[in-house]
Image: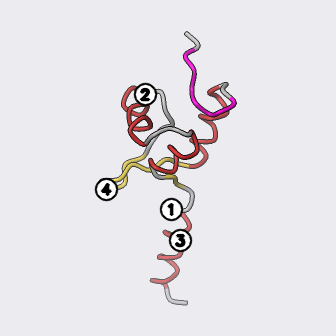
Amino acid sequence: MTLRSIGEAARAAALDEYLTTEEVARVTRTSPSTVRYWRHIGKGPRGVKRGRRVLYPASAVAAWLADSGDEQGVPTDAA
């Protein structure tokens, strides 16, 4: 295995730890536009810009779902 292939394998493994907007939408049973809106107003999981894409760390999505207090994973307004 060359250094280049090791670096590519590491990058691929790192990307597996991120979810796309569409994947987060499937998990929360909403549309991708709803996930984008949640991100815009600061209510959704924290996203990370990678080039033109927004990716969501799987750990951040899991923490957000656990903190939402809703069994379906959709955040509720507690205020």
Query: Which mark, residue 10?
Result: 3
Residue at x 43%, y 31% (from the top left corner): 38
Residue pointed to by mark 1: 15
Task: Identify the disc placed on residue 42.
Answer: 2
Outermost residue on the top side: it is 79
**Residue in the image at 64% along x and 28% along y:** 67
Q: CA distance from mark 4 to mark 3?
A: 18 Å
Question: Where residue 68 appears, x then y in whole percent?
Answer: 62, 27
Instruction: Give the mark nearest the N terminus, 1 or 3.
Output: 3
Residue drawn where x is 46% and y is 49% of the image? 22
Disc 3 secondary structure class: helix
Which residue: 58% across, 30% down? 74
- Give the magenta-colored segment's residue range: 71-77
Assign the N terminus to one quadrant of the image. bottom right
Is 55 magenta? The answer is: no
- Marks 2/3: CA distance? 31 Å
